[in-house]
Amino acid sequence: MTSEQLKILTNKGVIIKHPESIFIDDDVILDNICSGAEIYPGCRIFGSTTYIGKGAKLGNEAPVTVKNSQLGDGATIAGGFIDNTTLLEGANAGDGFHSRPGTLLEEYAAVGHTVGLKQTILFPFVTTGSLINFCDILMSGGTSESNHSEVGSSYIHFNFTPHQDKATASLVGDVINGVWLDKDPIFLGGQGGLVGPRRIAYGTVVGAGIILRRDVINEGMLISGSNVGNGRERPYNFKLYGQIGGIITNCLEYIAQIRMLYIWYKEVRALYLPEQLLSGATKRIEQVFDERIKRLKQLVEKFKGSIEEAGARKTSGIFAAQQSFVDAWPELETRLRNNFKHWERLPDEIASTLRDHIQEAPNYPIAIQTIPTELKGIISNWFNTNYNNRITYEKTK
């Protein structure tokens, strides 16, 4: 850190621990490091879009590297590396946090030590343990810091298949219902895993040590049992895909939910968040959307290989379905991209009323949870109308 940078930051009330050990690149806008932020020894800060809010802490356990990322007021990263990542008010991460582009932690979400995230969205209060790989996933559920969705330690979201594709993003909870912060929490037991792409309903409890390989559509279910058993051998050709309906359905539903989160940020969150955090969060959502389109496009190429590998069997129902999706993809991609950024706007008078309500609340979660019933009903109808204008698997046929 240069003496000029140190002078500017300390004069505005930023708390700098051992400034000689801290590096702040020239492209960092110092006005985006707010009064009361604390930067501990060994930290490195890069990027013109980096923003560090009031009372945020970087590196209180180990050095942190920050690249084009945003921390809301009171957010904390104890140690690690973040790139194109956004943490909203009060979100916190332990030492060894490794977060790559497309990661968004909403208010008071928390992750333990040595957690890897990428293309990951955690709604308010969602909490993970330690030693976790949780990439390509959205998780919601819970109503407070004491009643939250939880991921146990040593958990993995399996997001890479033997076919070598990543069309595997999973919804644990959802957006369309999750934004209201009034749903039952979801519990994923430690030493377990989720094989994407999956959908998990609110109130689901998955016992420790279980690898979940199916959707849980009904709310309030307990998944128990054991993964212990004798393995069996059978011929397998990783170039061949089987039935694709479930994969495509879940991929398109994930994209639909991401679109709804984007609309929510543009129409509702925009009434509350500072410009830098709003810009960062919407960028993360755009990155997630782009990633899902990219992975579907790669899946189309895999289907082409599967059809070729099938040889004389390529006219059978399984491979005919794959060919049908391959043929539909160019138009479908265009429709998905157009659909993502077109929606019915929230009426101005409703937005104005909602803005007044949100800004009077002590924080965003409480604001959402205390919206008057009539106003919530109006906003819900608007939100559901936009959700219904989504691209589904049936519409691709």
Image (tube, grey):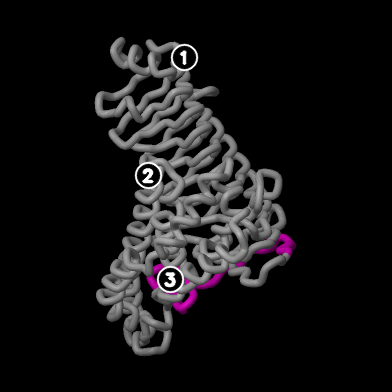
Q: Are marks 1 and 3 in contact (CB under 8 Å)?
A: no
Residue 108 x, y percent position in the rendering: 58, 41
**Magenta residues: mostly which secondary structure?**
loop
Residue 10 x, y percent position in the rendering: 40, 14
Q: Nearer the viewer, residue 185 or 228?
A: 185
Q: Give the residue at mark 3.
A: 386
Q: Residue at x 59, y 69 (%)?
A: 215
- Disc 3 marks a residue whose amino acid type is Asn
Q: Is residue 248 magenta?
A: yes
Marks 2, 3: nearer the viewer: 3
Measure the C-alpha gap from mark 2 to mark 3. Answer: 23 Å
In this rendering, the count of numbered labels is 3
Q: Identify the mark nearer the N-term, 1 or 3.
A: 1
Measure the C-alpha gap from mark 1 to mark 3. Answer: 48 Å
Q: Residue at x 48, y 67 (%)?
A: 383
Marks 2, 1: nearer the viewer: 2
Q: Establish if 42 lies above or below 217.
A: above
Q: Is residue 96 visible?
A: no
Magenta stretch: give its range: 222-251
Q: Helix, strand, or loop for circle 1? A: loop
Measure the C-alpha gap from mark 2 to mark 1. Answer: 26 Å
Numbered label attached to residue 280: 2
Q: Establish if 145 lies above or below 323.
A: above
Numbered label attached to residue 17: 1
Q: Residue at x 31, y 37 (%)?
A: 49
Q: Nearer the viewer, residue 368 or 311?
A: 368
Q: Quadrant of residue 217?
A: bottom right
Density class for disc 2 (Cα within 10 Å; few <14, some 14-19, many ≥20) is: many
Please give left or right for residue 245 compared with residue 344 in the image: right
Q: Helix, strand, or loop for circle 2? A: helix
Marks 1, 3: nearer the viewer: 3
Q: Identify the mark nearer the N-term, 2 or 3.
A: 2
